[in-house]
Amino acid sequence: MSAPTRRDILRFSAALAAAGTLAACGKSSDDEAAGGVVTVDLWHGQTDTGKKALDALIKQFNDTHPQIKIVGGGGGVTADSMLQKVTAGLAAGSFPDIAYIFGSDLASITRSPQVVDLSTVDLKDAWPAARDAVTVKGKIRAMPALLDSLCVVYNKELFAASGVPEPKAGWTWDDFVTTAQKLNNPAKGVFGTGWPGVGDEDTVWRLWPMIWDLGGDVVSQDGKTVAFDKVGEQVLGTLDKLRSDKSLYIDPKPGSEQLYQVFLGGRMAMVATGPWQLPDVLDKGIDYGVVPLPSYSGKAVTISGPDTWTVFDNGKARVKAATEFVKWLNDPKQDVQWDIQAGSLPVSTTTAALPEWKKHATATKGLQVFVDALETARVRPTITQYPQISQHLGEATVAVLLGRKSPGDALGECVKACNALLAVPS
C-alpha cells in the first residue's frame, strides 16, 4: 500500500453477479485447534509498507492473545483482486475468516449468507463516512479498514511562476476552472489540472462531491431512480469547460498513474487526490499545498472511499475470534499505528485526537486538511447496483471529456440506462 493508486477502483466483472447467488456452503464446524487456540485466516492483499504495518500488528495481537492465532497474507492476491478471490472461495466453500474488501464491493459481497452481521459492534466514535461505508440496509456488515478523503494538491512553484494567487478554502468550481486556464501553459507542456479518462471508478467518484453539493445524489430515497438527473449536466459542463479551454490533461489509462506522473513531473498545477499521494509528492521534492475541494454552493463537501475488514462465518469460535481481532484493529491504540505506518486517515475522531496522530499530521504538510475534510465527507451508497451506475456515468463522462457528446446528451443517455437498471428489483 506504499503510495498506492486509488484503492477503490471497481472491477466490473462476472464476480459481482456471482456474489449475489452464492450458496450457503461454507464450513460450519467450530474449527477450534487443539489446545483451545483458534486460528483465523486473514486475506488482506496488502503490499510493501501496508503489509509490513499489518504484519507487525498481527504479531502484536498474537503475542497478547494466546488463545487466538491470526494467520495473515492468505489469498495470494492484491487488494484490487480480493473481490474475485473471495467470491470464488465462497462459491467453492473455502473462504477466509476475514478479508480486506473495498467499501464499494461490500453490498455485493453481503449477498452471501456467510458474511457476518456485526451490528452489535459500537462505532459511535467512527467518522460518519467510515460508519456509512460499512452499513448495508441499516446493518453493520464489516469494520472500517482504511479511510481517506479527496482534496486538491497544487504545485506552489507553478502558481508563483504564473503570478496566480494560491487557492484557499471556500473557492468555487468557477474559480477552479479559471485558475486551471491561467496556469495552463502549452508552450512549456504544463496543464492546469487533470482527470482520469477511461470511465472507471476513478473517473466517476470525483464527480459525486460536485453532485452532492448541488443537491443531487446517486439514487433517489426510494432507490427507484437516479438522483443526479437534474444536476449532472452542470457537473459534466464543468468538465466540458476545462476540456474546451484545453487546460485539462486526460489520462487515457486505468489507475490514473499517468495523471499523477504528470503532476509529479512538475507539469500539472492542480490535482484532486487523496492522502495516499503525499509520500510521492514529498519524495519528488515538490513545493506543494493542499486545499479542500471547490464547490458550487460555497459549502464544503468531499468524498471518502473507505475499505473494510469483512468477517465470514467459518463457525462460532472463528467468528468470535475474527470479530475480536477487527475490533482490536479499530481501537485507537492500534488504529494510530496503522494510520501512520500504512497511510490511512484515522478511522475515528478519538484516534484523530491522539498526540501520536497530531504529531504525525503536523510533520506532514497538508495532511490535516484531509483529516478536516472528513467532517463533510460522504460515501457512495452501499447498494448492489452501484457498480453498474458508475459504469454508465463513467461512459458519459468520457464522452464529454473526449468531446464526443454534449453534457446534456451524455447525461440523458446515462440517466435512461441507470433508471432502467434500477427498475429491476435487486
Image: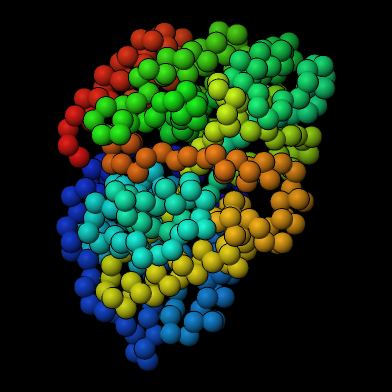
Task: Give coordinates of residue 321: x percent, y percent.
Answer: 39, 75
The residue depicted at 46 percent of the width and 67 percent of the height is 327
Image vertical order of residue 367 relative to residue 174, above or below:
below
Asked if one can make out residue 17 in the rendered structure from this viewpoint, the answer is yes
Asked if one can make out residue 249 in the rendered structure from this viewpoint, the answer is no
Q: In which quarter of the image is the C terminus?
A: top left
Image vertical order of residue 205 relative to residue 311, above or below:
above
Q: Answer left or right for 325 relative to 283.
A: left
Image vertical order of residue 92 relative to residue 181, above or below:
below
Task: Give coordinates of residue 134: x percent, y percent.
Answer: 40, 52
The residue depicted at 67 percent of the width and 41 percent of the height is 369
| Residue 272, quarter of picture | top right
Coloration of the structure image: rainbow
Q: Answer left or right for 86 relative to 212.
A: left
Viewer-side residue, 80 vs 383: 383
Q: Answer left or right for 365 relative to 54.
A: right
| Residue 77, quarter of picture | bottom left
Image vertical order of residue 67 relative to residue 247, above or below:
below
Identity of the residue furthest to the bottom in this view: 35
| Residue 390, quarter of picture | top left
Task: Give coordinates of residue 22: x percent, y percent.
Answer: 19, 54
Q: Answer left or right for 47 relative to 141.
A: right
Viewer-side residue, 421 vs 267: 421
Numbered label tally: 0
Task: Give coordinates of residue 186: x percent, y percent.
Answer: 69, 11
The residue depicted at 58 percent of the width and 55 percent of the height is 349
The residue depicted at 23 percent of the width and 77 percent of the height is 29
